[in-house]
């Protein structure tokens, strides 16, 4: 996932490698559920892939198995939620947000039940398993559904806080993360984690990198790299909440910076980049702008790292995109 | 507990009201509302432990109308049971009305927003499971259309209901044999239906879905301890209005003024006959 050069930059920044957000999620949920018997995990033969084995062993009465049946997963989760249960429905994001999309739309969001749907191993986490196992559509389809908070944590800290916030939230949440170990980001100089709030990880007014989820680390590395190699001062914003978007942070970045690069582990259609572009354009701000994401084509094959590299979702790729924007006449 | 005679009278009045509000709104699923009126009548007046006063009680019984398009029957029965004033239905399908053409929780008494088919059973499984997990004692009932059974999610729910031995869960199938394209057996045959549900591990009973005593007997208690119940209600689409009965075009349709007058005349005649019989 990281080139030797990127690892060197991370080391220079003093970043420590954390664990997978998936593991952070599972541990946090177990801790919360031990203290609150109303919290349930619902799985579709996904307790292993969701790292919920220990949860199932510790709290067998708080885990519900529905078998390989994602529509049933979401429908049953909604029924449980409607009766006062605090439900986390856990399944690979690729299936959860496609096969059971109608259940998400109607049974969770429209009926307004306190269910967190947890899309694990999201984006191209499953890499070489291919397109059936990728979720590059979920931001687009879920952004178009009313009454759903979309949360995409970038590191273990954001994941832990997101799980706690979701458990305390009595309305629908979509939580989405990957399964690869990830660097822990520096503390933001903004307010503590809250839904709807951006986290500014680095200040600067040349290029604003706006990322969500596990691309944010690559934005941070790119910003540091550009400072060393080109003397550019770039802002890095993590948007752990894709919806509702932190409009003021986005507008401030667009007004104060010379160019904007967005980064997401999602197709370039309908995701973070277009959300940010919509906000900026409707405010009447014209800035050089690049959406970094997966192109609208048959996705390049290979590991998650291969795919990130192919589409420029790396320190090197994002640095080049930013420098390219500034060089454009 | 109302008598069969009292309920029979209610059913006729409900049918009259269904037609009244469909005519008023200028839209509605006429045939399927008329086929499930008797089932809803028995559920709300005899079976369900829920009332306007207990609608927020966590231990109330839950009814989930999977065949959401028959919302007019549900609204008419809920209004009669006092969940909201029937005059609210003057806004049915109107601008900014809570009373849209499928059930929503913006209407007091409605448990789940339905309308897309194949959603009610998984929701009811989750509901019945929540009751079991807390040993709370409440029950879940869901009404499915027979055409709706082609949705695969029903069969996912059927597996789960039996797997978790949810004897506090009852599926009622409004088997009126017609769907929008034609006969259900021609569109996508689901027979033999009783055998299918039995093979999935459910206790099954087939009844006349317009016989109030038979509906009551089937819904009063689980058909078999340790198993979810499936009640196959053989019904007639458009029931109670001669020219609508078993006629596909009344799947959705608004009666003309003349048709409405003829329908009212038939239903009023039946009401008068009941009253005469009682006197």
Image: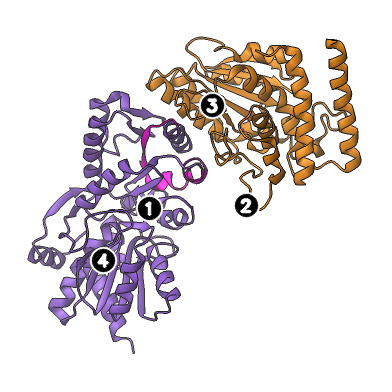
Label 3 element class: helix
Task: Locate residue A290: give its quadrant.
Answer: bottom left
Residue A314 shows up from this direction: no
Q: Nearer the viewer, residue A189 or A106?
A: A189
**Residue A150 bears which disc, if any?**
1
Residue B91 location, x and y as percent? 69, 46
Q: Colour of chain A?
A: purple
Residue B230 location, x and y as percent? 59, 19
State which chain is coloured orange. B
Q: Quick check: B143 above or below A247?
A: above
Task: Specify whether disc 4 shares its chain with disc 1.
Answer: yes
**Residue B96 bears which disc, if any?**
2
Q: Quick check: A284 above or below A70?
A: below
Q: Quadrant of the N terminus of chain A?
A: bottom left
Look at the image and give the residue range highlighted in magenta. A83-110
Task: Specify whether disc 4 shares its chain with disc 2.
Answer: no
Judge the density around disc 3: few (<14), some (14-19), many (≥20) Cα neighbours within 10 Å.
few
Label 2 element class: loop
Task: Specify whether disc 2 shares its chain with disc 3.
Answer: yes
């Amino acid at each position: 996932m990281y080139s030797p050069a990127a690892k060197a930059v991370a080391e220079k920044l003093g970043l420590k490698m954390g664990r997978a957000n998936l593991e952070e999620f599972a541990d946090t949920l177990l801790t919360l559920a031990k203290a609150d018997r109303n919290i349930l995990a619902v799985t579709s033969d996904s307790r292993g892939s969701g790292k919920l084995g220990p949860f199932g062993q510790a709290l067998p009465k708080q885990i519900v198995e529905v078998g390989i049946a994602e529509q049933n997963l979401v429908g049953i989760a909604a029924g449980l939620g409607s009766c006062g249960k605090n439900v986390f429905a856990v399944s690979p994001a690729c299936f959860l947000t496609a096969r059971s999309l109608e259940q998400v739309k109607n049974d969770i969001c429209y009926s307004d039940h306190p269910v967190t749907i947890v899309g694990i191993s999201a984006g191209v986490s499953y890499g070489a398993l291919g397109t059936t196992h990728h979720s590059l559509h979920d931001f687009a389809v879920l952004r178009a559904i009313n009454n759903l908070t979309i949360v995409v944590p970038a590191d273990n800290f954001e994941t832990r806080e997101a799980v706690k916030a979701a458990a305390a939230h009595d309305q629908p949440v979509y939580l989405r993360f990957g399964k690869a170990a990830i660097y822990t980001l520096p503390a933001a100089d903004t307010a503590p984690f809250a839904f709807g709030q951006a986290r500014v990880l680095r200040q600067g007014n040349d290029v604003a990198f706006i990322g969500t989820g596990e691309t944010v680390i690559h934005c941070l590395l790119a910003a540091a790299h550009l400072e060393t190699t080109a003397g550019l001062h770039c802002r890095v914003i993590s948007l752990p909440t894709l919806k509702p978007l932190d409009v003021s942070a986005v507008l401030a970045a667009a007004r104060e910076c010379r160019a904007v690069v967005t980064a997401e582990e999602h197709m370039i259609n309908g995701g973070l980049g277009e959300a940010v572009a919509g906000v900026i354009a409707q405010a009447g701000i014209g800035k050089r702008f690049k959406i970094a994401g997966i192109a609208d084509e048959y996705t390049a094959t290979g590991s998650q790292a291969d795919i990130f590299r192919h589409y420029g979702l790396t320190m090197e790729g994002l640095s080049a995109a930013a420098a390219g924007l500034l060089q454009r006449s | 507990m109302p008598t069969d005679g009292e309920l029979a009278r209610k059913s006729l009045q409900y049918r009259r009201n269904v037609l009244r509000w469909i005519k008023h709104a200028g839209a509605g699923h006429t045939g399927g509302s008329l086929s499930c009126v008797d089932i809803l009548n028995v559920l709300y007046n005899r079976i369900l432990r829920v009332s306007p006063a207990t609608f927020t009680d966590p231990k109330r019984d839950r009814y989930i109308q999977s065949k959401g398009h028959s919302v007019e029957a549900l609204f008419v029965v809920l209004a009669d049971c006092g969940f909201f004033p029937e005059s609210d239905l003057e806004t049915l399908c109107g601008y900014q009305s809570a009373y849209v053409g499928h059930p929503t929780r913006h209407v007091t008494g409605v448990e789940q927003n339905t309308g897309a088919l194949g959603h009610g059973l998984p929701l009811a499984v989750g509901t019945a499971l929540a009751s079991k997990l807390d040993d709370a004692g409440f029950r879940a009932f869901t009404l499915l259309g027979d055409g709706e059974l082609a949705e695969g999610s029903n069969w996912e729910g059927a597996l789960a209901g039996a797997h978790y031995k949810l004897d506090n869960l009852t599926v009622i199938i409004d088997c009126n044999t017609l769907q929008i394209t034609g006969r259900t057996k021609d569109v996508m045959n689901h027979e033999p239906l009783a055998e299918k549900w039995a093979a999935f591990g459910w206790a099954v009973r087939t009844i006349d879905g317009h016989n109030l005593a038979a509906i009551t007997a089937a819904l009063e208690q689980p058909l078999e301890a340790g198993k979810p119940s499936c009640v196959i209600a053989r019904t007639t689409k458009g029931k109670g209005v001669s020219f609508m009965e078993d006629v596909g075009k009344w799947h959705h349709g608004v009666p003309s003024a003349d048709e409405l007058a003829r329908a009212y005349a038939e239903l009023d005649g039946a009401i008068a006959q009941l009253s005469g019989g009682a006197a």
